[in-house]
Amino acid sequence: MFRLRVWFQAISGLGWSEAKSNLFFATYILPIIVKVSEDQDELPAVRERISFLFTEQRKGNLWHILTGVYHKFMPGVSGGVVPCNSYSGVGIVLFLLAIRDEMKQLDSEEFESAIKILYAHEVIHLEQELNGLIPLLDTMRGTLPKEAIVENIVAAEVDAWAKTITEVIRPMLQQGKKIPSSESKISEIFSKFNDDPNHPGWIDYIRRHYSAAHLIA
Ligand SMILES: [Zn+2]
């Protein structure tokens, strides 16, 4: 089993303890992503991304950050990518209370799909960064005006969700996998906009969801 480098972000005594956060991660999340990375029958778009994550962690380029709290401004958000200045790297951050809430509402197959989609989506953001497509992490590090930060984040999410839907969500549905209704819904919305990431309606839809995204907790 891989040993993840986990940095527990303690936030003023709120939420879960470090021990409880680590236990939840080890019990419910880690087994899913380890299995995916080793399963040759898994969708390459998911398996290769999660394998990349483990490789980068072993190299010390990536931190896995568990927080036993909700995102301060977007409580429904399960995860994200963040710059980690203190470790000169980047991190994937998980908001474990949002993931716990999601788990309560889903059966085990839907929850497994939700975790796969979450990780694939976050690695797509790392690919955007590596390909120089959208300077998402500089956006979060920098001191841009609020409007510019929102626009960069919207551009990143417009692209990342289009890829998540076409490369991950729809192939999972075609395989007959059960996925959370929120993920089916975003796929249906994208198809209403002709699967066109540049469609103004799609961009507006994403903007409405991420209008508070500049408020990094
Ligand atoms: Zn995203």
Image (cartoon, rainbow, N blue to C red):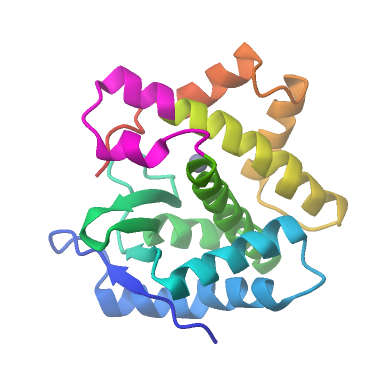
Residue under the point 67% across and 62% down: 48
Residue 149 placement, left or right of 54:
left
Please, is residue 13 above or below residue 181 in the view?
A: below
33 and 47: which is toward the camera: 47
Residue 131 placed where, x, y %? Answer: 54, 42
Depth order, front residue of 92/132 = 132
Predominant SS of the magenta segment: helix
From the viewer's perspective, tell me whether residue 107 is left or right of residue 129.
Answer: right
Residue 110 among magenta residues = no
**Which residue is farthest top?**
200
Asked where in the image residue 116 lies, by quadrant, the reply is bottom right
Q: Which residues are magenta?
A: 132-152
Residue 205 image offset from top left, x and y in percent:
56, 22
Residue extending farthest to the left is: 12
Asked if residue 109 shows in the view, the reply is yes
Q: Is residue 138 magenta?
A: yes
Quarter of the picture containing the C terminus is: top left
The image shows residue 133 at horizontal and vertical percentages of 53, 34
* 26 over 208 or under it: above or below: below
- What quarter of the picture does the N terminus occupy? bottom right
Q: Work out whether residue 210 can be spotted.
A: no
Q: Residue at x 50, y 46 (%)?
A: 130
> Is 119 located above or below residue 206 in the figure?
below
- The quarter of the picture where residue 72 lies is top left
Residue at 57 percent of width and 29 percent of height? 158
